[in-house]
Image (cartoon, rainbow, N blue to C red):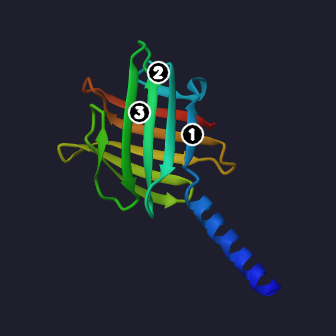
């Protein structure tokens, strides 16, 4: 009986650690404007991104923020790490996103509008799990090229 409980405990721990290592992106992340770089600017005033596990191998992402001129923003999507396109809600520059997990700490994405690639993303969580660096590049709503490196702190 004791051995069965030990084996069961080890199995539960292994499953929990596997889930945690594959879902290090999951959490609530607050934008650290001072550590972030926007080209071209200006930087937003604030931002919070909530990432939740979705299904067997995906995420639900909700991002809220305030632009430099005080406008509220809200974007959300649900996507699996299978490289297929999933709809993005309320993002004027792209209609879909596809995600691929590179390793437990890194996820790459491609955004598209009308089937045409308009941007690339990379989300990297630090080894200690406290910081998330989100790099985006593409074409903004005004048709300008941009590259942003945004740094988020885990809440």
Q: CA distance from mark 2 to mark 1?
A: 18 Å
Identity of the residue furthest to the right in this view? 2
Which residue is pictured at 37% across the width and 49% down the height?
78
- How far across and down, in percent of the image, does residue 5 sit? 76, 80
Identity of the residue furthest to the left in this view? 114
Q: CA distance from mark 3 to mark 2?
A: 14 Å
Q: Which residue is mark 2?
A: 44
Crowding around mark 2 (Cα neighbors within 10 Å: few <14, some 14 to 19, many 20+) is some
Crowding around mark 1 (Cα neighbors within 10 Å: few <14, some 14 to 19, many 20+) is some
Kindly state the secondary structure of the residue where label 2 is placed: loop
Which tag is nearer the camera, tag 1 or tag 3? 1
Which tag is nearer the camera, tag 3 or tag 2? 2
**Going from the N terminus, do you reach mark 3 or mark 2 first?**
2
Which residue is pictured at 37% across the width and 35% down the height?
75
Q: Which residue is mark 3?
A: 147
**Going from the N terminus, do you reach mark 1 or mark 3 first?**
1
Which residue is pictured at 43% across the width and 13% down the height?
70
User: Is mark 3 in CB contact (under 8 Å) with mark 2?
Assistant: no
Which residue is pictured at 73% across the width and 74% down the height?
9
Q: Check the image and report above or below for 100 versus 49.
A: below
- How far across and down, in percent of the image, does residue 15 sit? 62, 70
Crowding around mark 3 (Cα neighbors within 10 Å: few <14, some 14 to 19, many 20+) is some
Q: Nearer the viewer, residue 11 or 103?
A: 11
Q: CA distance from mark 1 to mark 3?
A: 23 Å
Q: Which residue is mark 1?
A: 28
């Amino acid at each position: 009986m004791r051995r069965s409980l030990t084996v069961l405990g080890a199995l539960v721990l292994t499953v929990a650690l596997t889930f945690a290592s594959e879902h290090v992106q999951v959490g609530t992340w607050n934008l650290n404007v001072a550590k972030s770089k926007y080209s071209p600017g200006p930087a937003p005033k604030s931002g919070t991104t909530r990432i939740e596990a979705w299904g067997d191998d995906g995420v639900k992402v909700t991002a809220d923020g305030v632009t430099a001129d005080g406008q509220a923003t809200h974007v959300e999507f649900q996507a699996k790490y299978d490289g297929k396109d999933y709809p993005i809600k309320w993002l004027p520059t792209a209609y879909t996103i596809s995600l691929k997990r590179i390793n437990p700490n890194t996820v790459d994405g491609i955004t598209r509008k009308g089937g045409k690639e308009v941007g690339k993303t990379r989300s990297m969580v630090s080894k200690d799990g406290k910081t998330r660096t989100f790099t985006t590049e593409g074409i903004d709503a005004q048709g300008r090229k941009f590259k942003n490196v945004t740094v988020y702190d885990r809440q």
